[in-house]
Image: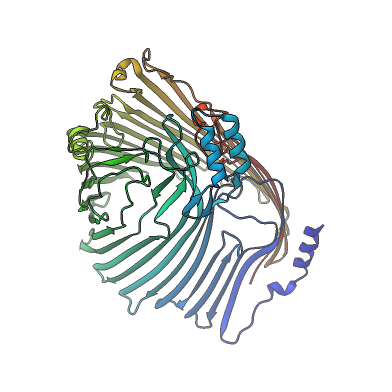
Amino acid sequence: MALLVGAGLLLGGPSAVAQLDLPDHTVKGEGEFGVRQIYGSHGSSKFEEYRHIPSGLFLDRLRLGVEDKEQRQFYELRVTEPLERDQNYQLRAGRYGRYAVQFEWDQLPHVFSNTGRSLFRGGADDLTIPSLVRSTLQSATTPTANTATINTTVNENAQGIDLRLQRKTATLGASYTPTPGWDVQFSYGNEHREGTRPFGANIRTNNTSGFNTVELPEPTDYRTHDVRAQAEYTADRWSVAVGYVGSIFNDDHTSLTWDNPFRTTDSATLGAARGRHALPPDNIAHTASLSGSLNVAQATRLMGTISYGWWRQDEPFLPKTTNSLLSPSALPAASLDGKINTLLMNYTLNTRLHRDVSLTARYRHSLLDNNTPERIFDDYVQADSSVVTTDRRNLAIAYTNHNAGLDVGWRPVSVVSVKAGYGFERFDREKRDANITNEHSGKGAVDVTPIDWLLLRASYLYSQRRFDEYDHEKFVGEHTFPSGEPAGTLPQHPNLRKFDLANRNRNRVELLGQLTPFEPMTISATYGLGKDDFKDVGFGITSDNNWSAGLDVFYRVSPRVALFTNYTREEFKSKMRSRQRGGAAGDTAANDWASDMTDIVDTVGAGVDVGVIPERLDLTLAYSIAVATGQVRARPLGTPTVSGFTAENYPDTKNRLHQLKAALKYHLGENLTAKLSYTFERFVNRDFQTDIMDPWMGAVDSGANSSIFLGARQPSYEAHFVALSLSFRF
């Protein structure tokens, strides 16, 4: 009833479409407002993960524009979903062809979960647990876990917590064109991200069970300042531009400190009473650029860009431990003194050798020069419970990249277009497992339009990447541990290959067909295939393949009826091989295992547009469903010798999203439309990783007896939206 009353009030306002009559200006505008009600079980965080849809009165959009009679000056206001957590406002003003000023305010929520519960209290970056709760949990883990006491204590004392972020961005921009050749632009952006999100950390408990997990509510209070400026001059045959981009990042919280739920005092062997973890550090980045273009000849154009950047980060180091009973050596420096310089050079030459032959040559050079000091740390603290007296060095990872390519286009006849190209990419890396990688690629494409209602397109790419030398110990391990790795520690397996460095053969195929057999019908079909085969891989990803196919059909049955439908299927399959070593004695092929991972997504949609009463009443119906499934199949490749090692299949994951939309539009006049709409959404989530999450998971896994979680889930939901709105324009 409230919905109908509200709609009646809205429709009762014919003045909403009256044109403003100003002596010296023309005013134009459009918008939609109404009343909305939401029903169903929509309490899941997934329902409003990146949006805000409240019941009640709403303003979907509003645009107001003002011009002077000579159409020289303009003013414009755009508003989307005001007073909601995903609202947007834009204000523009200026003089056509001369200058403009724009301000934008944008908000975007991100809801992680609304089922979270936590034992922690206190300030945002200093989390505490009531002393009675900690002492009870400490007693319950001595000498072995008393699961009943832990379960009762955790669940009775865990309180609800909001796990969400809110992003707010303000942007001010200006452009100025004093003469037809000059263009000057400036913008300043200020983004603030604030809220709480899940954060995983390790602890030691009051027994010798090893490391355990504590999931914390991480405070997020980021502010990013973004400054951009550019001046460009364009002449008849050439242009030149200079630019600057600056970014300043500030985190209001430098670190996160928390109580150990299972320890009230420090222990020299069983861990600290409190834990601490660094949060993203403050940093600053500057980039200056010079770009230009030149028409070398009538059919030849050269374009180039050179940019230089310098990034700095000098956040003070945290102490090595919070444990008062441990005495590690002093830090080698008070802060990082992080310094990275970047260089980018990008050149492109376009030319037409013949009326039907074009040539494009490209070269790109990028450099990341890491001048951060590499310091030796005499020792390090492991899980706040022991000092490991082994030298470790931080690594200043750097690289140089060269990328070159040549593409040729040829139109032998008017209905056929052919393209072919060659590409080369080289990476020279410092402090990575492989020192050099070279990749050669060849590609080809053909477009055929045999008749004006048929387009066929096919493309193929093949590439080979090979490393020069792959040796983790030589390029990484010996630098990280200058005095050798700790006794009893297994180094990285020499047959492990990381996917971004491994030898790889890549194949890519793309097909497209567009068909218009007769004027009211359009059919479009696509197919894509990708195959990445990683060569000579002992352990790691051995293959990564995917394919997709899609079909879209639009058919206008009559001037009043149109049908549309679509279907897409995507499949992703990868294979991995690894070894469960569990110590030097287990480093045998008997403990090898393999895993096959498959993700499949099917999306189907269909709908109809009907002009029920020509130029008066329209009906739109649309339905879509997306189904995603995930599979992980694991198997041993030998007879395992490591105790407790099993390679087994994970439960399948599946989620479905149903959407049904119906809208009935009644045109009250040329510029006024009333709309009654209904939307149905059902999200079904089946994920063994999160479906049963609670603050204490010992009842499911005894290995989690001394771990604490947030119990963050994203349950299924079902929602019904009913809205009555009025849209106008003038």
- Is 293 situated left or right of 158 in this image? left
For this rendering, which residue is in front, 593 or 467?
A: 593
Vertical order, 674 against 26 (above or below) = above
Give how far across and how far down residue 214 sits, in percent.
Answer: 48, 40
The mark total stands at: 0
Give the quadrant of the N terminus: bottom right
Q: Residue furthest right?
A: 1
Dividing the picture into quadrants, the one containing residue 425 is: top left
Residue 502 visible in the current orientation: yes
Dividing the picture into quadrants, the one containing residue 60 is: bottom right
Give how far across and how far down residue 646 sits, in percent.
Answer: 44, 19
- Is 27 situated left or right of 213 in this image? right
Give how far across and how far down residue 190 sits, in percent.
Answer: 43, 65
Residue 518 visible in the current orientation: no
Vertical order, 729 against 406 (above or below) = below
Name the colouring of the figure. Answer: rainbow
For this rendering, which residue is in front, 508 or 170?
A: 170
User: What residue sits 30% from the left and 29% below the top?
Assistant: 534
- Is 383 situated left or right of 660 in this image? left
Give how far across and how far down residue 207 sits, in percent.
Answer: 45, 31
Dividing the picture into quadrants, the one containing residue 302 is: bottom left
User: What residue sits 37% from the left and 20% below the top?
Assistant: 593
Q: Residue furthest top?
A: 639
Vertical order, 373 against 271 (above or below) = below
Give the quadrant of the C terminus: bottom right
